[in-house]
Image (cartoon, helix red, strand yellow):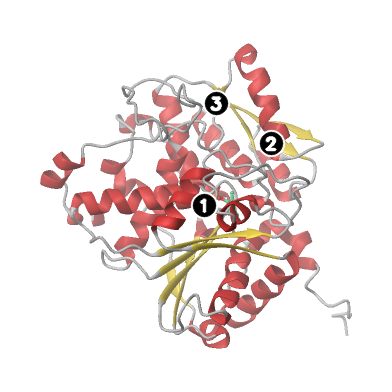
Amino acid sequence: MCSKSGSEFPIGKLYNLSPKGAPLLAQYDLDLARTKLTKKQVTQGPHSLWRYKSLLPLQNLDNLISLGEGDTPLIPISRYGQHIGATRLLIKDESTNPTGTFKARGMTVAISMAKELGVTKVATPSAGNAASALAAYAAAANMEAHIFMPTDTPRANYIECKIFGAAVTLVDGLISDCGAIVTERKHKEGWFDISTLKEPYRVEGKKTMGLELAEQLNWRLPDAILYPTGGGVGIIGMWKAFDELERLGWIDKKRPKMIAVQSTGCAPIVKAFEQGMESSCYWEEASTLAAGLRVPKAIGDFLVLQSVSESHGTCLAVTDQELLSAGHSLAEREGFFVAPEGAACCAALEKLLQNNFLDRDEEIVIFNTGTGLKYLDEWTTQIPQASDRS
Ligand SMILES: *Cc1c(COP(=O)(O)O)cnc(C)c1O
């Protein structure tokens, strides 16, 4: 279904954007599922996001390409919580996914669907982690992967892609410049453009973060969710997941405040939210070491802004220095070595507790979207120069 016009399209065909230039979102017969699908069937499923296969688009499991993604832990972080003044704080730790980030969730679904629909060559622009995940899943599916990433993408991503056998082009520009190259060359080269939200299924994979969260909290939702927002696909996906769970009758109407966190070096969605706009404007000279947040103009920005407002949430930005020191403070107290994007949620939470947007006794979930190990150069700046040698 087109996310702008609502017009519908049949399943079983390859799709990019709708004729209106908007993302397509998959729809399920939830009235039927409501009478058939039980929570028990789901909880007895595999220990991966494929336990939710009834809420995913794949028709034939023979086409499944899975590396064991999803089923990530939801863990209380009370020492850090106490330090910043939150009594019921949890972290949803996505660093345990294949290739170390939640991007694997989107790719397992998108690549399985691409295989089902006969694709053999895929291409994407990426700020880094989507490229690693695509390269891994394409390797497993025996597909060609063509990846375009900015030259200053974290080195780990480049190395992973090469080791997975992808064709990598480094572009002296931003992710939007990389996207333009894919758009220009895809028809001639016969590539399927698997850019996020330019095909309908990566968001389906990402929505499983919301399904898992509900299951882990015994089919209810927390008071607030902080999510590091680049393209915002995680927020769009989770919001869709909550709606689907309500239509299944598995959760009630209550929704968490959805809080979109960006970096002050690239905060188009925060700016649009503050100005009360329905969509964002291109952010000039985007720059932040949280590479996943360096998205100057997100194609699904209007959907992110809608979910944030409907949820009575908010959008805010933090500086690179703030996110590094908050991530360091979390690591020292809890033993989580998070990605700078996850660290941004910590810094944002500190602010929202200080200005009383969030209350100390609310149940709050922060998303760590990836492992800190992919960002060794960025985290090295947190280590004092003093010599460790005796
Ligand atoms: C891609 C990415 C993000 C942003 O994800 P969206 O859901 O598209 O906003 C956040 N953190 C990390 C580590 C990422 O790789």
- The amino acid at mark 2 is Ser
Secondary structure state at the residue bearing disc 2: helix
Q: Which mark is drawn over residue 175? A: none
Q: Which residue is mark 1?
A: 102
Residue pointed to by mark 2: 176
Binning the other alpha carbons within 10 Å of mark 3 as few (below 14), some (14 to 19) or many (20 upward) gives some
Residue 135 visible in the snapshot: yes
Instruction: Kindly identify the residue that appears in the image at 58 percent across and 67 percent down.
Output: 345
Rendering quarter of residue 376: bottom right
Q: Is residue 117 left or right of residue 157?
A: left
Q: Which residue sits furthest top?
A: 188
Looking at marks 1 and 3 on the same chain, the residue that comes earlier in the sequence is marked by: 1
Instruction: Characterize the local packing of mark 2: few (<14), some (14-19) or many (20 or more) Cα atoms within 10 angstroms.
Output: many
As drawn, 319 above or below 302: below
Residue hosting label 3? 143
Q: Nearer the viewer, mark 1 or mark 2?
A: 2
**Residue at horizontal 63%, vertical 61%?**
339
Q: Is residue 111 above or below residue 219?
A: above
